[in-house]
Image: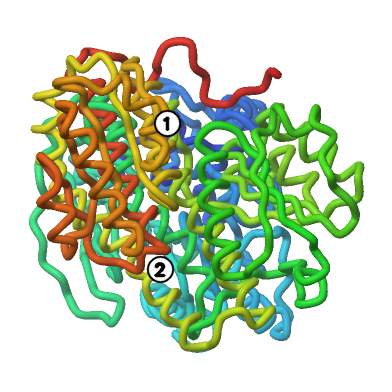
Amino acid sequence: MCGIVGYVGDRDALPILIKGLKKLEYRGYDSSGVTFLEDDRIRLIKKKGRIEVLENSLKELGYNTDFGHEQEKKICLGMGHTRWATHGAPSDENAHPHLSDRRHVCVIHNGIIENYTELRGFLIEKGVRFLSETDSEVAAHLIEYHYLTNCNADLFSAVQAALMEIEGSYALVVLCTEHPDLLIAAKKDNPLIIGYGEGANYIASDIPAVIEYTRNVLIVEDNEIAVVRRDSVELFTVHGQKVERDTFRVDWDAEAAEKGGFEHFMMKEIFEEPSAVKATISSRIRSNRIVLDGFPLNRDRILKASRIHFVACGTAYHAGCVGKNIIEKVCRIPVEVDVASEFRYKDPIIDENSIVIIISQSGETLDTLAAMREAKRRGALTISIVNVVGSSIARESDYVLYTAAGPEISVASTKAYLTQLSCIYLMAFEMARIIGRIDQAEYEHYLDELILVPEKISLMLEKQSEIQRFASEHFNAKSIFFIGRGLDYFLSMEASLKLKEISYIHSEAYPGGELKHGTIALIEKGTLVVCSLTQDRLLEKMISNISEVKARGAVVLGITSQDKENAIRSCDEAFTIPPIDPILAPMLAVTPCQLFAYYMAVNKGCDVDKPRNLAKSVTVE
């Protein structure tokens, strides 16, 4: 997720832009930039690295970025951006803002332009020169193209026309040389707000950037365009209809504003799961087809693989376990899953026909990176699933699938896990189609179900109070067991990890059928057992396991589907997820488990975002 700041008013813009970008640093970024009008020309300064690098560059050019030290000639309009790379590695050229070919228009953008390849080709045919590898640069050139050819130099109409052609998500702000008193902003599937000030108005991707100057805020909704001047804000639909909406007053303090009003980043990131999953899958499903640009696996290469390997650590390892089950089911190819720290030392059976899938949120996990290098040394094809563009694993793997989780601040991974699963499902379903293991009807059914996942996660989040209440009654538990069968067992592994890493409660995960082989000796009156019951063909077996633990005095919380009445009745309490094809159930069932871990930790007074002894990116062996 990128940071966006725009300003038009009677104060000096540069200090406001730089300070606003710093207030958005918590969102994560790899480069930053600002643009402003000076002597009727667009000035553009952008740099890879920290905001301080940008600030120093501005000062070297003679610009003041501190309040109280205004420019010799006041700059009253500008915009700034911090970039989290999605298309193109971190670099000065790929940083925002992006300037159009004939220097009329400058754009900052957060989101993904799904059809940028087609739009880029069209613009190149028109003689446009591109200076970056990004999808966002397309927006600047496309708006200028319409501005000069179809819209009679009407900037609003040019933005409208461009948005009609752009497919994907965006929070977009546009500056134009011929309109020195105007910024135009547009929004679809990415956050954008307008702050109303005295003699000034502000645009930002999040409230912390403006809270120092105003607490009167308007939320721009999807498919809306805002026309922002110093003394006015007009809101329209993308089709040009006027929109009337009241502002609201922000009562949060600055720290709470960074967390979107949530108490912790972890809860904020759980609530971002629907948008993160949508961003990860939406650009890769077009016209009932999965589109993985440059995907290296054709029919012969897949069938030639004797087996596929997942290699990862922690939560990413659990995503790989789900991947094993999914690929074996839909592709009928054997899959192994290895903990990265063990992979190198077991003398893995890997050769040039092997496919090794590496999963890492940061792309820098040392054990995982070393395992990938070992696989490459043995001739394997390596595919990585990572969240950070340009990271070591992304650069060194043969092919990379980027997740669109955005920055994850809390140490405990939540939305990153779901976006990793999203990539795994996309890859598994596409491989199965390529080799003919599933027919077109089954393929389209899976895609239809996958597309509905973000909406169904949102429905579950509306019921978070049910989990909150249950956690408030059981947070003093000394030991908690998670059980499940099939995909539910892998879900239980992740649920158990989340609980122990942030609440410090001892927890174990077991296949339901394994309890009787020793672990059931630990079950006594009052022991809490969390059971996952989403797999239809294993439901009766799991209900029998529930009877076994309840007979020994256990209290059972079930995670199951709304339509599974027998499962609900078998538990002391149940949290229900919306109905979904069982193969995709892990995408829904993990969210209540994350909420359970969160509320258990909060009730115990633990530091949820920074649990003891843990680090976000593990770069030691």
Q: Is residue 12 above or below residue 433?
A: above
Callout 1: 10 Å neighbours few (<14), some, many (20+)?
few
Q: Quadrant of the C terminus?
A: top right
The foreground one among 310 and 306 is 306
Q: Left or right: 456 with respect to 168? A: left
For the point 14% across and 26% down, which residue is it?
553
The foreground one among 587 and 79 is 587
Q: Left or right: 294 with respect to 210? A: right
Asked which secondary structure carries label 2, the reply is: helix
Q: Is residue 253 above or below residue 318?
A: above
The foreground one among 247 and 88 is 88
Asked which secondary structure carries label 1, the reply is: helix
Residue 601: image quadrant is top left
Which label sits on residue 517? 1
Looking at the picture, which amino acid does disc 1 mark?
A: His
* Disc with the residue nearer the chain's start (1 vs 2): 2
Q: Which residue is mark 2?
A: 450
Count of labels in the image: 2
Rendering coords of residue 551 (x, y %): 16, 33
Q: Is residue 37 above or below residue 364?
A: below
Rendering coords of residue 148 (x, y %): 54, 81
Rendering coords of residue 446 (x, y %): 44, 74
Looking at the picture, which amino acid does disc 2 mark?
A: Leu
Residue 497: image quadrant is top left
For the point 23% across and 33% down, which residue is it?
549
For the point 56% across and 81% down, which residue is it?
438
Q: Is residue 13 above or below residue 583?
A: above
Q: CA distance from mark 1 to mark 2?
A: 36 Å
For the point 58% across and 25% down, which residue is it?
52
